[in-house]
Image: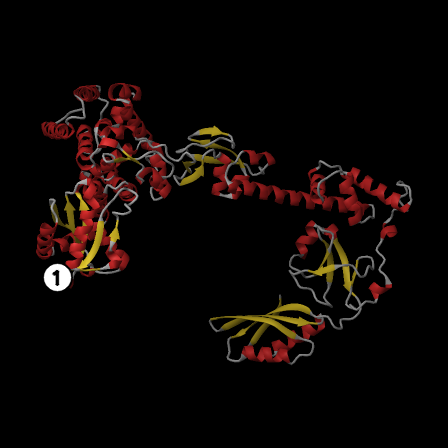
Amino acid sequence: METSLRERRRILTLYRELSRLTRGYILPEHIRALKRIWAEALQSERVVRSEQKIHPLEHSLSTALILAREAGMRRSSVISAILFNDDLLRGLSLDEAERVFGAATANILRGLTRAGELSGHDKALENEHFKHLLLSFAQDGRAIVILIADCVNRMRRLGDYSEEQQAEIAHSAGLLYAPLAHRMGLYAMKTELEDLTLKYTQPAVFAEITRKLAESKAAREAYISRFIQPVRDALASAIDVPFEIKGRTKSVHSIWNKIKNKQISFEDIYDIFAIRIIIDAPPQREKSLCWHAFSIITDMYQSNPARTRDWLSIPKSNGYESLHTTVLGPEDKWVEVQIRTVRMNEIAEKGLAAHWRYKGIKSEKGLDEMLTHIREVIENHDPQRTDDFKMNLYDDEIYVFSPKGELYKLPQGATVLDFAYGIHTALGNRSVGARVNGRNVPIRYRLKSGDTIEVQTAANQTPRQDWLNYVVTTKARNKIRQTLKENMQKLAEFGRDNLVRRLKNRKLELDEAYLMRLVKRFRRKSVTDFFAEIGEGRLDTNQVIEAYLEMLAQDKGLSVTDNTALSASNFAFEPSEEQLSGSREDVLVIDQNLKGLEFKLAKCCHPIYGDEVFGFVSVTGGIKVHRTDCPNAPQMRQRYGYRMVRARWAGQSKDSQYEATLQVIGKDDIGIVTNITSLISKENDVSMRSIRIDSDDGLFCGWLTVMVPNSRQLDSLIKKIQTVKGVKQVLRS
């Protein structure tokens, strides 16, 4: 690859600056090895310039310089950043990297290589779980810092990339790397990434805010000077250690967020700038000096208690320590004041990387705990201890992709079946296998983080009992059990229908008492299991009928072969006189002139006394009464005709009341509802249960629920309602 003279000069400048910053912890033999590796890569043409204009070596050195200068990273991280080039890593084995540069560098490079496997999943960037997956792939926390620095480097040189690459880099910077930088305490990088993302994604907004900041710069700086001078004088006379006071302007992105979220103008933002006091305090006096400075400032200016933050007593989870307060300064302007020490400021600027030089963190599960909680104080502030830092993340979680690039979180040990049920119950129920990363696997295959799963289905597939051994998620387990139960109920219903039909062919009815004896005789746990096995064919229907006939014959003292003696008339239900002449005269006569049977009126059509009706034998053996014009009647007649029996009303409807619903449609005139309800109230033996009215564009549609003694009374009521002025139609629901 050709390298221009200008590029060589830039590369040499970067190299000299990096050598100066890393002198003392990057050994000469490491420098020689790096030069050799790059020379070999360039000579063998492994490094090929892509669409961007920047030289790959210049890019790697720039990223390494950002790490050393702005994140405070050391040997292993800087070396890994220099080697972090796709084409270079293709020719450098991790074993060789470990032999030449040490295990820490090899681990970081391994994490960077694995993190590269996630490229192309732009759709998942907005998913919070993608950050978790990236961290689990990176393994070592320093790999994440390198990725953030690499993103900062690309954003600074975004003009050197194609338009398509610019959009992709800016997208990932705003959604992924800026939030990661914030979590790791890399506030300077986080702010720069947010501002650059806004600059390229919303250039007009960025330009407008930048222009207004420039216009107000002189007045802002003059006000800051007036505010700082008395504070500096007061602190100088009260504090016996060096300190620094400087003003800080709010970032463009932060200003835009406040404008957007609070729906205010630029001029209405009162905390565009802040004052930062940095005290050069010894470790044992840090807190006392910060609080002393706080008391001096709040004595001078009125403090806003609602805007006071104490991150000295309890630091933020990423190690941030500082005292914040907002005071009412000259000209009645609110000013934010931040008080911290030199050590705290370095941590605030360089995040966790700076923390590692003061304190250590040890591995534990969870994102925030792993990345940001302080765990162990390192004696003598030994920076080399950072080489021992590992990220054994998410031992109990994995993150996988759908074919469309959507990201899903699953527990460790989850299978293809868990993933399928996580997407949709129907998908899980029909699963027969999957393609994971392009390879065919069974439904019991255990998934790993980063897998891309395409579930394969079959229309005739249904869950089996052994599937419960293949899943670990509660959702999958519950859905499988639910479907198995539903299938069992369907089989049981089919089995019962089959047995009842076969018995009817012999002019016999299934008696519930004999049914329980059959279940016990065939040693089944429940009636449902009994009927399900008949429906599935595991229990022969002929054997069941023979056993049934045998029990009938034994109870009647007859021979099983005597078909005449075992006719239906021998076992027909004969109602007693008391049943026939009971208080309910509106009884139903079911099938063969049987009265007094327990029945229920179907809720789908609400039959009332006087309607043309039929009976339907339910799965539980009871009878439900439907109107002959019930909307479900055609389907019932087609599928379950053998379960339908004749029924008719007998006696007289005297004291009983039946529920009926009427739909009334008409003009939305004043008083029409009052007229209808008044009419109903005057009817004898009729009462109104409820009324619901909807009106739209001059028409109204009402549903009236009334209680009537019979169909004749209901027909009369319908005719009367139709005479009300404005009523167009009255229908029975």
Q: Residue at x 49, y 30 (%)?
A: 445
Q: Position of residue 595 (x, y in %)?
A: 81, 61
Q: Residue at x 46, y 71 (%)?
A: 697
The residue where tag 1 is placed is 330
Q: Position of residue 576 (x, y in %)?
A: 86, 61
Residue 359 in percent (x, y) is at 26, 36
493 is higher (above) or lower (below) than 299: above
Q: Quadrant of the C terminus?
A: bottom right
Residue 356's image quarter? Answer: top left
Task: Name the image quarter holding residue 134.
Answer: top left
Residue 194 image position (x, y, % from top left): 23, 46
Instruction: Note whether residue 714 is visible.
Output: yes
Q: Nearer the viewer, residue 676 or 31?
A: 31
- Residue 335 appears left or right of 587: left
Which one is nearer the viewer's eye here, 521 or 392?
392
Circle 1: element type:
helix
